[in-house]
Image (spheres, rainbow, N blue to C red):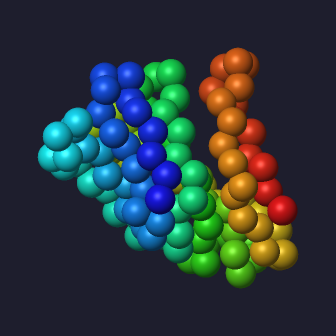
Amino acid sequence: MKYRITPDGNIVFNTRTEAVKVSDDDGGVIWRYEFEDASGLDEILCIEEDAILVAGYTNSFGEGSTNIFVAKLDSDGNLEWQEAYGTEDMEFCLGLIETTHSDFYDLVKC
């Protein structure tokens, strides 16, 4: 399980399955989002625009049997977009990096 602190002091974390949860500092759940198309979530990143970027893998859609899954949620837990990236081989996300150039994020994969 990975977690990050949002700019407003809440805690956002993935459950290592298909869900992301945001809690306050007392542990109360503010919101929870379950992804239907993710098979597992490995990375989470709070980005400048008060949004949350999550990454993991999917066996549900994309080119190959296992592809990188990336999604963006707004600060209220609404899905903005989700994508699968990959080839016919198996790909997994090893990390998310916020860059200083516009809205581009590097995915490190193998």
User: Considering the image in quadrants, where does the C terminus appear?
Assistant: bottom right
Residue 80 in sight: no
In the picture, measured across the screen, residue 95 lies left or right of residue 2, that is right
Q: Residue at x 31, y 23 (%)?
A: 8
| Figure quadrant of residue 65 | bottom right
Residue 8 in sight: yes
Residue 26 locus on image (x, y percent): 17, 40
Q: Residue at x 45, y 39 (%)?
A: 4
Residue 10 locus on image (x, y percent): 29, 33
| Figure quadrant of residue 5 | top left
Most extreme residue toward the bottom is: 65
Most extreme residue toward the front is: 26
Q: Residue at x 46, y 22 (%)?
A: 49
Q: Residue at x 65, y 30 (%)?
A: 98
In the picture, measured across the screen, residue 39 lies left or right of residue 57, that is left
Residue 74 locus on image (x, y percent): 37, 36
Q: Nearer the viewer, residue 61 or 15?
A: 15
Residue 68 locus on image (x, y percent): 68, 62
- In the rendered image, the vertical position of residue 101 relative to residue 86, given as above or below: above
| Figure quadrant of residue 50 | top left
